[in-house]
Amino acid sequence: MTGKGLTIAIDGVIGAGKSTAARGAAAALGYRHLDTGAMYRAVALAAARGGVEPGAPALGAFLEGLSLEFPAGRGGGIHLGGEDVSEAIRSPEVSRSVGAFADDPVVRRVLVRRQREIGRCGGVVAEGRDMSTVVFPHADLKVRMVADLEERARRRHREFLAAGVEISLSRVRADIRRRDREDAERDYGVEGGAPEDAVEVDTSGLTADQVVDRILALARKRGA
Ligand code: C5P
């Protein structure tokens, strides 16, 4: 731990509630919330606008020149060259293309470096699939979030309905299954899956507040 607080790394399966938990825990502790999925999405958005494909030789230089910022306050958000793209990065087009950019080793190298810079001083809740294995292997607290497939499907389905998207529960469930499989096939640069010192939090049957409370209790035990 540093003078500014702990480094908390949250990873886990799709739809286990990582984002809500990370945002809530960061707010309660007065830490920064580092949403690394938003960084991959912003890269996909910027590349689409710039006409740069994943795997293109120009991608490395393009990324080095990219201004990607998380302005403090105002509920966070992500800015690309000064423009707030927090909503634009959630579009279906970005959701479809982000995987190919996330698979590109050049993108991963650049973003992992930036994530480490942001987390260097501690006082951060970092969320994403490779947080405790690759980006912050020495995090003060590593949380791996899991939940039943059925519960994850129901939650995602409710979110779609709330956003006015008509989709069946079975389609949402099948989509999560497919993404679980794809995720399991990716090693994010490490082998062996979850680190032994990660604490598993099963969010099935828990409310968002209860999940945040669990994480806060774990963080306090470690001196937050
Ligand atoms: O979490 P979110 O759905 O916003 O992440 C978008 C995509 O970014 C994921 O589907 C995954 O392909 C990629 N990602 C990643 N490593 C991270 C965070 C996200 O590869 N640490």
Image (cartoon, rainbow, N blue to C red):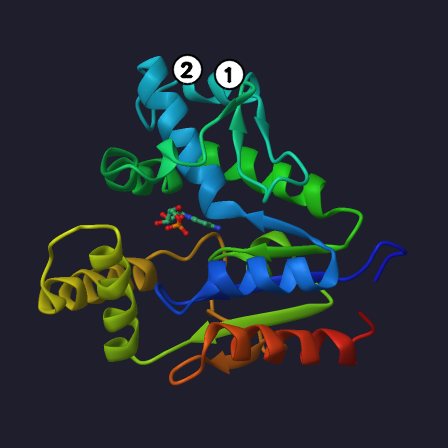
- Which residue is pictured at 49% across the width and 55% down the height? 128
Q: Is residue 152 left or right of residue 187?
A: left
Residue 177 showing in the rendered view: yes
Please report contact status of discs 1 and 2: CB closer than 8 Å, yes or no: yes
- Which residue is pictured at 53% across the width and 80% down the height? 210
x, y (%) of residue 93? 24, 34
Callout 1 crowding tier (Cα within 10 Å): few <14, some 14–19, many ≥20: few
Q: Is residue 164 left or right of residue 212?
A: left
- Which residue is pictured at 62% across the width and 43% down the height? 115
Quarter location, residue 55: top left
- Which residue is pictured at 77% across the width and 53% down the height? 122
Does residue 141 sit above or below 94 in this rendering? below
Q: Amino acid at mark 2?
A: Ala
x, y (%) of residue 57? 39, 18
Q: Quadrant of the N terminus?
A: bottom right
Spatial CA distance of label 1 from label 2 is 6 Å
Which residue extends farthest right? 3
Q: Secondary structure at mark 1?
A: helix
Does residue 203 sit above or below 122 in this rendering? below
Callout 2 crowding tier (Cα within 10 Å): few <14, some 14–19, many ≥20: few
Residue wearing tag 2: 58
x, y (%) of residue 61? 51, 16
Q: Which mark is residue 61?
A: 1
Q: Is residue 71 left or right of residue 89?
A: right
Q: Amino acid at mark 1?
A: Ala
Q: Secondary structure at mark 2?
A: loop
